[in-house]
Image (cartoon, rainbow, N blue to C red):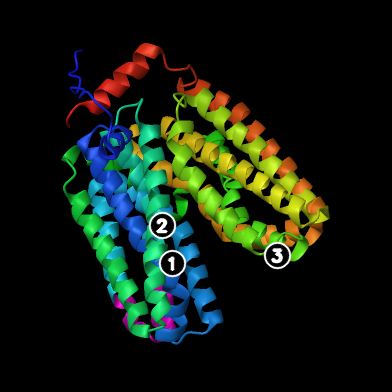
Amino acid sequence: MTTEKAPRTAGPRTPVALLRAWLPAGRSARRLVAASFVDSLGTGLFIAGSALFFTSVLGLTTVQVGIGLSLAGLAGVLGMVPLGRLADRIGGKRAIVALYTWRGVCFILYPFAREPATFFALAFLIGMAEFGGGPIVQRIVGAVEGEGSRVRTMAVIASLRNVGFSMGAVLASFALATDSPTAFTALVFLDALTFLGAAVLLSRLPSAANGATGASADRTSAGAAVLQVHDPRFLALSLLNGALFLHAIMLTAALPLWIATRTEAPPAAIGAVVFINTVLVVLLQVRLSRGSVDLRSAARRQQWAGWALAGCCLLTALAADAGPVLATALVVGATLALTLGEIWQSVGAWRLSYTLSPEDRRGYYLSVYELGTSTASAAGPALLTWAVIGNGQAGWVGLAVCFALAGLAVTVIAHRAGRAVGASAPATREQALSSVHESAQER
């Protein structure tokens, strides 16, 4: 197979040229990346002003807001697998366009949800579409990208999503500074427009983005969906990935609470943690995704994630006994370790879940795999605040042991699962190059 190489231009590379080289080569993948960026930009706009919108515009109490957000998380757990099965029936492209349109319409209705019951219903519907979209995006990446490019494309999407969140939050700060309910409402409508814009971008994907469909795989009830995954090792890998995904709860809840209540580090250290993590993910996500070409290398990434997250826990525990300067240094070190763990966890998860998913039921299998992370998102805050922070340094040491064991267990189970499906052998150099060439061709 011969492939044409893009002509190289002489002279220094401009930022635009560097960006083009960094982005996926395929036009379909670039549309998917653009849609994800637009989505994250709007989400950043909304998240930054959501608390004020809920309380000042809708007039909800903090308890009602908490109930609504919990319902959104529950909807994500309940709806993820049925939506994955739907994607297998109608195709990934059709399903993701429908979900983005769904979210856009729900956000248009948000400013009119001034009764708690209406707010709860909308939050439930939004949560189902939000959580269910991730596995479908991964399914589409698998359909439009070659074997050697899928993990890297997912890494680009993750990096640009972080950029989008940050940009959206910065733009929202101007609206928040006005302290105007009208401005808070405008942020919600802008978020709705970004979802609808993403739907338009995704509607221009080729029909190949639908991937293989298999209606015969989806004839049973949604309640029995998980039981259709007959390989218990796949379910075990999903749960272990959920355990490693607790890094997300550490970043947003456990680490800030520990810094504020159990260390002498200044409050500014909390903001520094989020800033350092965001910047490093943007800079390192794509670079550290290289080399994850088969089950063995993917499992190794998750083992590294377990070690890195264990190190983060130990550094966090030590910060409680240190003075302000040393405590801050330990917190920064813990953030670096957490970020490496976050990147390796996601890189390993993308390759493991895709390789072990049958092609004709890929959306369904990927959704089942994501149940681990959605369960961690729902149970993680209570688990980490009660079992970890509540037990002080001993709690962090115990969590470190759990992370290390989870990473080790992934390597053992993935190796056995790979042998069962004949996917454990590393990809050869020729296979990898062939996949890269394939993904660069026009679809």
- Residue topped by disc 1: 47
> Looking at the image, is mark 3 or mark 1 earlier in the sequence?
1
Horizontal side, residue 169 vs residue 391: left or right: left
Question: Is label 3 or label 1 in front?
Answer: 3
Separation of marks 2 and 1 at Cα, in angstroms: 9 Å
Q: Nearer the viewer, residue 397 or 405?
A: 397
Mark yes or no: residue 363 visible. Answer: no
Query: Callout 1 environment at 10 Å: few (<14), some (14 to 19), or many (20+)?
Result: some
Q: Earlier in the sequence, mark 2 or mark 3?
A: 2
Query: Residue 358 in the image: x percent, y percent?
Result: 38, 33
Q: Position of residue 12 (x, y in %)?
A: 28, 29
Residue type highlighted by circle 2: Phe
Which residues are the magenta region? 109-125
Quadrant where the C terminus lies?
Answer: top left
* Residue position marked by numbered label 3 in the rendering: 260
Q: Which mark is residue 165?
A: 2
**Quadrant (top left, top right, bottom left, bottom right) of the N terminus:** top left
Amino acid type for the residue under numbered disc 3: Ala
Q: Report helix, strand or loop for mark 3.
A: helix
Q: Is residue 111 magenta?
A: yes
Alpha carbon distance from label 2 to label 3: 24 Å
Q: Residues within 10 Å of mark 2 (few under 14, many from 20)?
A: many
When the figure is inspected, residue 326 is found, relative to residue 350, above or below; the finding is: below
Residue at x 60% of width, y 37% of height: 305
Left or right of 213? Residue 225 is: right
Instruction: Say if mark 2 contacts mark 1, CB within 8 Å.
Output: yes
